[in-house]
Amino acid sequence: MKYIQIKLLFLALTLCCSVGQLKAQIDPHFSQYYANPLWLNPALTGVTDGDYRVNVNAKQQWASLGKGFLTAGASFDTAPTKNLSFGAMVLNQNAGEISFNQLNALLSGAYRIRFGRNGDQIINFGLQAGIINKSFDPSKITLGSQFNPIMGYDDTMPFNETFVSSSYLAPDINTGIMFFDAGPNKAVNVFAGAAVSHLTQPKDKFIGGDAKMPMRFTGHGGARIELNYMFDITPNFIYLKQGEAQEFAAGAYAKFMLDAESDLIFGSNYRFDDAAIAFLGFHLKNMVIGASYDFNTSSLNRATASRGGLELSISFTSRKGIVGPNFFCPRL
């Protein structure tokens, strides 16, 4: 059983992580972090220039190494009143030969404080509550005890191990704060936020003992800079820390207006000691479609030929009855 625990611990610590600074990251991570707002920070709930928003994301990672990691998520949020907003998100990741799966389902709420001369300086306080489920398929585990010295590996041989559980469910709570300058006619709009995830620190029942999921600390920010009425650029950064693992990424994306209802969006980020990221998106009316690709720059690039992961995102914002810009909000 000790061997099984070590194998599960290793998988949990390396799941969906990068090889550079992310040596023990547990949570999934995204390159298009602003296209997944409720994962990034609960305080981004309702931070949209419409009456509701729907986001869908999918990321494939390290497929060249065999059974890669596949992460998919969806979220919905709305701001029915001036100061209150609500939302929900689901995030699922499947990885590895034993189908290790992590599922998050959360409800979100946020409260908004406005200040400044025009009330366009905004602080959001957000809270999420829900569940986290982890599971694996014990029938797919292979051990040295199943090796026949004559025939080789024999999956009909028992591995003489028992599991207390191959699936467990635990409560999960996240919180965050967000500031942004929402003035729609300003040359520079600054935004910054911080979040803490897994406040309950659920115990890892696969590993046993006192092992707990470490809290995840997130810091992020940037500024939208309007160069002219057709072109703006948004430098941005994100910092994540979970247990001994950490990630820092920085870069910029630009938006070029094609016509009154469409924009071309493009840019790049660098996740330090891990990957260079290229991004391309298209904004048409109420929808933004984005695609990004991670190029490995870590020691894993030899095994993967620098191929990291493809990520896709779709964001739809309903603006029924809204004419012109409502306010600026951090978006991709």
Image (spheres, rainbow, N blue to C red):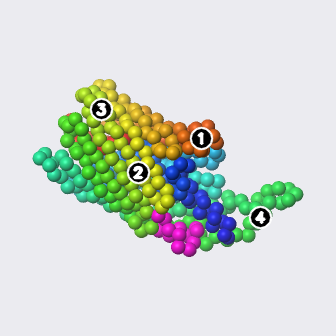
Q: Residue at x 60, y 60 (%)?
A: 10
Mark 3 belongs to which amino acid? Asp
Residue 135: give x, y in percent of width and height: 56, 62
Mark 2 vs 1: CB contact within 8 A: no
Is disc 2 surrounded by few (<14), some (14 to 19) or many (20+) residues within 10 Å? some
Pick whichever of labels 3 and 4 is earlier in the sequence: 4
The disc at residue 239 is 2
Between residue 202 and residue 166, name the one nearer to us.
202
Report the residue marked by disc 3: 232
Residue 173 position by quadrant: bottom left
Residue 61: give x, y in percent of width and height: 55, 45
Q: Residue at x 58, y 38 (%)?
A: 306
Report the residue marked by disc 4: 145
Between residue 246 and residue 111, name the one nearer to us.
246
Question: What element does badge 1 sit on?
Answer: helix
Left or right of 56: which side holds 296?
A: right
Mark 3 vs 2: CB contact within 8 A: no
Mark 1 vs 3: CB contact within 8 A: no
Please state the extent of the stretch shown in magenta in the rendering.
Answer: 202-214
Residue 63 position by quadrant: top right
Pick whichever of labels 2 and 4 is earlier in the sequence: 4
Report the residue marked by disc 1: 301
Question: What element does badge 3 sit on?
Answer: strand
Which image quarter is the C terminus in? top left
Question: What element does badge 2 sit on?
Answer: strand
The disc at residue 310 is none
Between residue 45 and residue 56, name the one nearer to us.
45
Mark 2 belongs to which amino acid? Tyr
Mark 3 vs 4: CB contact within 8 A: no
Q: How far apart in space, not on screen, are marks 3 and 4 (Cα)? A: 61 Å
